[in-house]
Amino acid sequence: MKFDLSILAKHIPFLLEGAWLTLHACALAVVGSLVLGLVIGAMRTSASPLLNRLAAVYIDIFRNIPFIVQLFFFYFGLPEIGIYIDAFTTGVVALSIAGGAFTSDVIRSGILAIDPGVIEAAQVSGLRKITIFRKIILPIALRASVRPLGSVFINLILTSSILSTITLNELTGSAKIVASNTFRPFEVYFVLLVAYAALTYAVSILIGMLHRYLNRHQEEGAV
């Protein structure tokens, strides 16, 4: 069979709709996972044994259960107890919760890597704990964690392809429909490969630029 991408021309708008849905879901999931990661990461480094333990349980559960199982539980399981959530919201929530477990570990590592002398100096100056965390600890930890967080967010984009299993026509779901209608899976999935590669590559470039921008003073000092 001859390789022919022209047969997909009339399906491009539909595929672009799927790509937009993927970007929309992933953008919301990145925000959600970052917020959860900040909260859980702070709890994980807390002096409170209870908060520390609760955070550890959250991380252990959602890092060790396959994402598709979590997704099916939220979409097919919760309606059995009267909780109904649409496919898009379910996908965003599931991605956020799963991503939050990995994000929290990255942020925790960033917090633990901070020089204790910096925190002690802030405490001696009389700053409140919440102020120290918000103004000193968090900015330093996030700046050091940009690249690993970028890897987590790229993984969220790749994982979002599983959302097609709950009838959400994001990029992968749209590609499945086009492949079944055109009977040209090779061309369709070739385009899908290129699309995901381009998307993740673009994100990696943005992460690299953000990392250099946030750490520009350290690089200038090294020079």
Image: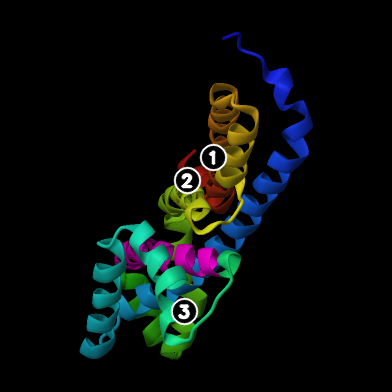
Q: Amino acid at mark 2?
A: Leu
Measure how far apart labels 3 and 1 are at the Cα level.
34 Å
Q: Position of residue 17 (x, y in %)?
A: 72, 47
Helix or strand or loop: what does disc 1 sit on?
Answer: helix
Q: Nearer the viewer, residue 186 or 208?
A: 186
- Please tell me the numbered disc located at residue 200: 1
Magenta-colored stretch includes residue 92: yes
What is the span of residues highlighted in magenta in the rendered image? 90-114
Residue 84 is left or right of residue 122, and the answer is right
Disc 2 target residue: 158
Helix or strand or loop: what does disc 3 sit on?
Answer: helix
Q: Amino acid at mark 1?
A: Thr
Measure how far apart labels 3 and 2 are at the Cα level.
27 Å
Say which quarter of the image contains residue 11.
Answer: top right
Residue at image point 52% right, 51% down: 164
Q: Are marks 2 and 1 in contact (CB under 8 Å)?
A: yes
Magenta-colored stretch includes residue 157: no
Q: Position of residue 88 (x, y in %)?
A: 59, 64
Q: Position of residue 96 (x, y in %)?
A: 48, 66
Name the dominant secondary structure of the magenta segment: helix
The number of discs equals 3
Asked if one can make out residue 45 in the rendered structure from this viewpoint, the answer is: no
